């Protein structure tokens, strides 16, 4: 995804506490915003990545070692690494190498943005 002047980026979303845009149930999402957000939703569209995201987001202390993620799946280490790379590239997780291990943590600002975008108010009776 190229970074052009004036376009929204996932980094911009993570820095702000305010929603990037109104919920999609209230207003049409601009094409530029949709292009920025789509990779994050696409990354979460895979069952393994959704499980990994859940494990990372719910980890005690806010982070988890890849050494604790890999044994939870019947997949090879390189396959898990590929899925984690996809989550990183989508902006959903941050990673920090400590010695031989990599620790992952969710990026809560972006997660809040995605949740706010999908918020649908209950109809009033």
Image: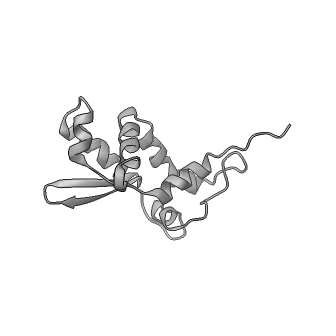
Image side of residue 61 versus residue 29, left or right: left
Q: Is residue 14 above or below residue 118?
A: below
Q: Residue at x 34, y 46 (%)?
A: 86
39 with respect to 74 (left or right) = right
Question: From this viewpoint, which residue is outermost toward the left?
Answer: 100
Q: Nearer the viewer, residue 75 or 55?
A: 55
| Left/right of residue 110 with respect to residue 120 in the rendered view | left
Query: What quarter of the picture does the N terminus occupy?
Result: bottom left
Q: Pick out the residue farthest to the top.
A: 74
Quadrant including the C terminus: top right
Q: Nearer the viewer, residue 103 or 94?
A: 103
Which of the pair 115/26 is nearer the observer?
Answer: 115
In this picture, is 65 found above or below 5? above
**73 shown above or below 82:** above
Residue placed farthest to the front in the image? 60
Q: Position of residue 114 (x, y in %)?
A: 54, 50
* Residue 116 x/y as whole percent: 61, 52
Q: Which residue appears at 41% of the width and 55% of the height? A: 91
Which colour style is shown? one colour
Picture residue at 59% right of the left edge, 60% below the top: 20
Indicate the position of residue 67 as horizontal and vertical percent values.
20, 45
93 horizontally vs 118: left or right: left
Which picture quadrant has residue 83?
top left
Q: Residue at x 13, y 55 (%)?
A: 100
């Amino acid at each position: 995804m190229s970074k052009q002047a004036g376009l929204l980026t996932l980094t911009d979303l993570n820095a702000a506490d305010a929603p990037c845009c109104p919920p999609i149930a209230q207003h049409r999402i601009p094409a530029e915003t949709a292009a920025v957000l789509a990779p994050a939703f696409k990354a979460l569209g895979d069952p393994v990545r959704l499980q990994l995201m859940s494990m990372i987001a719910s980890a005690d202390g806010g982070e988890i070692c890849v050494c604790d993620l890999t044994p939870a799946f019947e997949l090879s280490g390189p396959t898990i690494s590929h899925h984690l790379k996809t989550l990183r590239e989508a902006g959903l997780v941050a990673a920090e190498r400590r010695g031989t291990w990599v620790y992952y943590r969710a990026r809560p600002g972006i997660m809040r943005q995605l949740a706010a975008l999908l918020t649908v108010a209950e109809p009033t009776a």
